Amino acid sequence: MRQVRILLCGFLLSLAACGGSNNNPVVPPVNGVTPLSAGQMVFDSDRTGNFEIFVMQTDGSAVRQLTANTTFDSWWPRISPDRKRILFYRTPKGVHDTDYSQTSLWAMNADGSAVTLLRDRGTDGWVLQGHGEWSSDGTQLTMFGGAVANPQIYVTRADGTQPRRVTDGLGFWVDPSWSPNGSRLAFAGCVTTPCPVANFEIYTAAADGTGTPTRVTNDAIRDNDPYYSPDGSKIAWLSETQAPSSSFPVGVWNIRIAAPDGAALAGVTNDTNVNSKPDWSLDGTHIFFHRLVYGTPGGFTIYSIQPNGVGMVQLNGQIGNNEFPAN
């Protein structure tokens, strides 16, 4: 079995520092670009040999390839609020999301045109970078970046420049995302350095960096990838509910949900497979995620489920590994 793609932090690997800079990217205008509809989603897939970015309807139909560069693996697509731009990461072909010291941040128009490098490897002296997310008004991004030992949460302009640190420089912080009104960020990590992955908890903090982060989870299991619901009333994330074993080589992962203060904690999925990377539908009625079912052929495929855990379905027409859905 290939390495599971839920391992979202390069600190799990032996990382080497890397160079390069691109502090003044030129972002092409998006005039004349047809935005993606609310019924479309983006994802990455290796169906062509390397990972590329694709778009499809939220039922899995009408798949169309957007990127085509076999030098890279292209992955982690995120749609801008006006749905005219797509943010994504690239690593050398064969690396995918296994080494965050080799990531570069890119953007393109919703039709796949005007592919633009925003942040090269090593920009601003960061050894690691990842998990870029648009703010609700499209004017800013959040991401993690920095040193291997203690990456931090940052906010940048929409072109990836002028990073401003949100966390205070202590601890180990990854996986940021925005609240719907843009006032807060949710992220994962812990206040200590080093930070064993088993100690990862979910936190929220003011997006301007003021105040003290608020802890959402308080358990003895690893938590990653928090995302606010569109109305801001819930946060969904993934948890390692069972450690790796001979039966479950990469562990058992399930999606959980709670209020932003941690109240009303509940499971969305509850099985012995890998359920990873929750992404809310625009209307908040469903959560999309990628899923690996132990004991079956193939890799990850994209599913949909209601936030109450009802109605899990696999989307149609998937070939190869299909991951990191975003509506």
Image: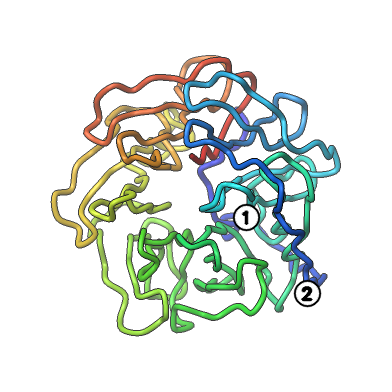
- Residue flagged by tag 2: what amino acid is it? Asn
Q: Residue at x 62, y 55 (%)?
A: 13
Residue farthest toward the front in the current orientation of the protein: 32
Q: CA distance from mark 2 to mark 1?
A: 30 Å
Q: Residue at x 61, y 66 (%)?
A: 158
Which residue, given by chain and number where applicable, does mark 2 sit on?
Answer: 24
Q: Work out whether residue 4 can be spotted.
A: no
217 relative to 254, above or below: below
Position in image of residue 214 (x %, y %): 27, 71
The residue carrying pointer 2 sits among few (fewer than 14), some (14 to 19) or many (20 or more) residues within 10 Å by Cα, namely few
The residue carrying pointer 1 sits among few (fewer than 14), some (14 to 19) or many (20 or more) residues within 10 Å by Cα, namely few
Q: Nearer the viewer, mark 2 or mark 1?
A: 2
Q: Quadrant of residue 111?
A: top right
280 relative to 58, above or below: below
Q: Which mark is residue 13?
A: 1
Along the viewing direction, whichever of 68 and 38 lies nearer the viewer: 38
Would residue 165 appear left or right of 107 to someone viewing this image?
A: left
Position in image of residue 41 (x %, y %): 53, 35
25 relative to 105, above or below: below
Position in image of residue 19 (x %, y %): 81, 70
Would residue 60 appear left or right of 190 to someone viewing this image?
A: right
